């Protein structure tokens, strides 16, 4: 998705650029849902929302809540109270738990009665009747030229190779939060031009990127690449639970890509499924890559791999498996034997 559009619901899907522009404009929308997405954008959206309320009225007409159940009554009270300033009130909810969302669903008219309400929350937790009237940020993918330009600005007067910029973006999954800290490391590590070799030595792949590499490598039968991906997962230093979740989500995405291609359904169906069930936006390039990988593997093999991952997860939780990464390496060995005997 590269622009705004309507879905079966009444909410409007927009990109993060459109959302921030709207918030900073003269006629902001009533409700925004900034999720899922990169934390880099949340402070920008919050600052834009705060600026809509005069500074001397912010103690009365601006409020932030974390969205847990204990704050539900305070949220309702804030929404129902009169404005002390120019009629504009701004509410920021940085997350909603299920119980709070259920309680707030009875007060949707209050959210829509004021000039502006801003919500940072998982769309799955926002009451459906409120989501129907929201502007939902579904595309956090900025034009590549903008991302590259941002990287070069952060580097400042130092030179950086074009391929190094590309490698940095790839390894951090385009996360501005991660790129910011990794650029600081690169500046400290190097004293001249930043090369692609520097990036590969300094910047570890994020666990989500490493997991995606693993799933793609297995689907293509590239056990050598899969072993590298497991090593990258180990270097990411995340918990067994996170590793298994990332890998399982990758195979679930692969499974649905296979089903989409077999039934000749449009790519948009795969995008919609990923956004609804995995809270992840896939651009056209990512969709093409997933479909290409799915074409190289049998549906039954994907299902068997998911069964094995479920066994590993169960064994990890019950203490029968001490390390998920070792179990994944064992799984790769099994896949390699199957590949050679096929």
Image (cartoon, grey):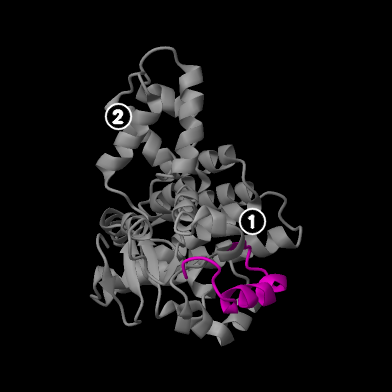
Along the line of sight, the residue nearer the viewer: 297 or 116: 116
Instruction: Kindly state the secondary structure of the residue where label 2 is placed.
Output: helix
The verdict on residue 148 being magenta is no
Number of residues whose C-alpha sits closer than 10 Å to that of mark 2, classed few (under 14), some (14–19) or many (20 or more): some
Spot the residue most to the top: 191
Vertical placement of 125 versus 234: above or below? Answer: below
Determine which residue is flagged by label 2. Answer: 163
Quadrant in which the N terminus is drawn: bottom left
Vertical placement of 116 versus 53: above or below? Answer: below
Instruction: Kindly state the secondary structure of the residue where label 1 is placed.
Output: helix
Give the alpha-carbon distance from disc 2 to disc 1, as whole Å: 33 Å
Residue 63 on image: x %, y %: 59, 63
Number of residues whose C-alpha sits closer than 10 Å to that of mark 1, classed few (under 14), some (14–19) or many (20 or more): few
Q: Is residue 4 visible?
A: yes
Along the line of sight, the residue nearer the viewer: 294 or 288: 288
Residue at screen point 40% across, 29% down:
154
Quadrant in the picture for residue 197: top left
* Magenta segment boundaries in residue numbering: 63-87
Residue 297 on image: x %, y %: 35, 61
Quadrant in which the C terminus is drawn: bottom left
> Disc number at residue 305?
none
Vertical placement of 68 versus 148: above or below? Answer: below
Determine which residue is flagged by label 1. Answer: 241
Eye-nearest disc, 2 or 1: 2
Q: Is residue 337 visible?
A: no
- 267 vs 174, left or right, is left
Spot the residue most to the right: 319
Q: Marks 1 and 2: in contact by CB < 8 Å?
A: no
Residue at screen point 35% across, 71% down:
272
Q: Earlier in the sequence, mark 2 or mark 1?
A: 2
């Amino acid at each position: 998705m590269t622009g705004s559009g309507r879905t079966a619901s009444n909410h409007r899907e927009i990109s993060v650029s459109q959302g921030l522009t709207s918030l900073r404009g003269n006629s902001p929308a009533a409700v925004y849902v900034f999720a899922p997405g990169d934390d880099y954008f949340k402070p920008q959206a919050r600052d834009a929302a705060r600026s809509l309320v005069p500074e001397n009225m912010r103690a009365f007409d601006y409020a932030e809540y974390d969205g847990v159940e204990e704050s539900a009554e305070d949220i309702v009270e804030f929404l129902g109270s009169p404005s002390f300033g120019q009629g504009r009130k701004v509410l920021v909810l940085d997350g909603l738990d299920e119980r709070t969302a259920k309680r707030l669903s009875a007060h949707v008219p209050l959210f829509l009665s004021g000039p502006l309400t801003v919500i940072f929350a998982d769309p799955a937790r926002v009451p459906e009747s409120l989501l129907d009237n929201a502007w939902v940020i579904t595309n956090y993918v900025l034009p590549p030229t903008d991302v590259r330009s941002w990287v070069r600005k952060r580097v400042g007067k130092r030179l950086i190779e074009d391929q190094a910029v590309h490698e940095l973006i790839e390894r951090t999954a385009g996360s501005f939060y991660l790129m910011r800290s990794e650029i600081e490391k690169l500046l400290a590590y190097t004293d001249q031009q930043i090369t692609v070799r520097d990036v590969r030595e300094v910047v570890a792949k994020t666990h989500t990127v490493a997991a995606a590499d693993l799933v793609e490598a297995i689907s293509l039968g590239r056990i050598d690449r899969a072993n590298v991906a497991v090593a990258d997962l180990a270097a990411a230093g995340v918990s067994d639970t996170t590793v298994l979740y990332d890998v399982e989500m990758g195979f679930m995405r692969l499974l649905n890509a296979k089903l989409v291609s077999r039934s000749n359904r449009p790519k948009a169906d795969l995008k919609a499924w990923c956004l609804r069930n995995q809270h992840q936006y896939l651009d056209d390039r990512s969709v093409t890559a997933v479909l290409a990988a799915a074409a190289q593997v049998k549906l039954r093999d994907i299902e068997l791999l998911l069964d094995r991952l479920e066994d590993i997860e169960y064994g990890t939780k019950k203490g029968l498996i001490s390390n998920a990464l070792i179990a994944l390496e064992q799984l790769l060995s099994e896949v390699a034997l199957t590949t050679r005997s096929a």
